[in-house]
Each structure stands twice: as C-alpha cells, then as structure tokens.
Amino acid sequence: MNYAIIAAGEGSRLAQEGVQKPKPLVELCGEPMIGRLINIFTRCNAESISVIVNREMTEVKEYLDTLKLEIPFNIVVKSTPSSMHSFYELSRIMPQGKFCLTTVDTIFKEQDFARYIAAYEATGDECDGMMAVTPFIDDEKPLYVDVDDMMLVHGFHDSAYEGARYISGGVYALDGKAIKVLEQCMEQGISRMRNFQRALIENGLRLKAFSIDKIIDVDHAGDIAKAESFIRS
C-alpha cells in the first residue's frame, strides 16, 4: 500500500491558542503527529510514503529529513490554498496504484487503522475505494456519509439527515480511478475535499465505507490532551 499525508496547513488555530510548534510536530504521547502516522504506515506494510508540507514549515521539513526509511519517501514542499490542492500535488509524485491518504491531524488507534487497510486490500477489484467513517461526531463541520446495509456509499451530505449514522473520518483508500476524478475537479476549479468525494460518486466509482468507532481531529489546543487520552485508552 502506498500512503500519503497532507501536512501543508498552517495550523493557525493552534498557534492562536498558544501552541508554538507547527501542527505536524505537535507531540501526542511523546511522538510528533506526523512521525506517529509514518510509523503506523510503516507497520501497515507501506510500499511508499509521500508527504506535503508548506514552505513556511521549515522545522517540519528538517524533521522529515532526519527520518531514515527503507522505502521510497517522497516530500513535497509547497504552500497550497486547500487540502485538495495539496492532494493534487501529492498525486503527481505518488506511485501508481492503490493508496491511502489522510491529513496529519487525523487521530485513530493503530489497530483500527490496520483493520481498515486489511479490509480494503481484501476487496481486490470489487470496489474503487474504501472511506473510513465513524459514528463519533466531534467535528465542527462534519461530512455525513450515506451508506446502505452493505456499507456501499451513496452520497455525502453537509447536514445531518434522518437515519444518518456516520461521518467521514478523513481517511481515504482509493485507486487510480480517483486520480482521474481529482484531475477533472482541479480543471473545474473544485477545491474542497468533500466535493471531490461527491465527484467520485457522480463519476460512477464504487465506494465502500469502513466504520471505525472513534476518529478525532486535532484542531484546537484542547484537542491535544483529548487525543493523548484517546490513544492511551
């Protein structure tokens, strides 16, 4: 499996709340968030890892340069206007084939993530992607994922609806078909990841969902202690 990390955000909310380190280097249980992800990916049979950081995050690039991995490790240094633009930049350097993409501040338990990756790899060619979803809602602007009883994804919604069970966990396992949709979205000026996900459905890609009990984001200073407690629990 090829893995990719979007770590190009400015982390402005954390900085405004007194957190001095760049978001990717904020430590959870003594480990930088970006380092934690890389270590998890390595233990989940990573064939390559690609990361994008913005130009202002010189400390993050310096940290990444100290890592010695036995697999291809691609780093893009570029400031982008959105996560989707960052994804596009990553798509230009990632190896072809199946991949898993996440943002640096998406926090999950390793055993849950390993089960998710194993489930996606076991699908073979029966689906074009598997989206991590969660019933745990602790997001300021959650994206609700409409699934049927077979966990096939039928749509993405900005607001809760009757029967809604899951929101997006911000982890996407996809294949090469998704990159073609991404390129179309960029040409059309679409710049939000949630609209990219909608475009996947509109273009006929068959997506499944995989439920993880809890996934949280580190957006505010108070989320750091919350994330550490979650990891330790």
Image (cartoon, rainbow, N blue to C red):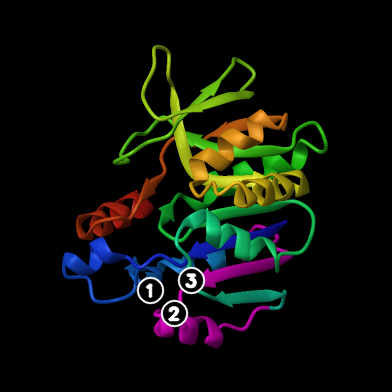
**Label pair 2/1, CB-CB below 8 angstroms:** yes
The Cα–Cα distance between marks 2 and 1, rounded to whole angstroms, is: 7 Å
Residue 12 is labelled as none
The residue closer to the viewer here, 33 or 29, is 33
- The magenta region covers 42-69
The residue under the point 76% across, 44% down is 177
The residue closer to the viewer here, 125 or 37, is 125
The residue under the point 33% across, 39% down is 141
Mark 2, secondary structure of its residue: helix
Indicate which label's residue lies in the foreground, 2 or 1. Answer: 2
Residue tagged 1:
25
The residue under the point 16% across, 70% down is 18
Mark 1, secondary structure of its residue: helix
Residue 90, x across and y down, in percent? 63, 64
Residue tagged 2:
60
Q: Is residue 96 visible?
A: yes
The residue closer to the viewer here, 39 or 192, is 192
Question: What amino acid type is highlighted by mark number 2?
Answer: Val
Residue 35 is labelled as 3
Tell me which numbered mark, 2 or 1, is placed earlier along the sequence.
Answer: 1
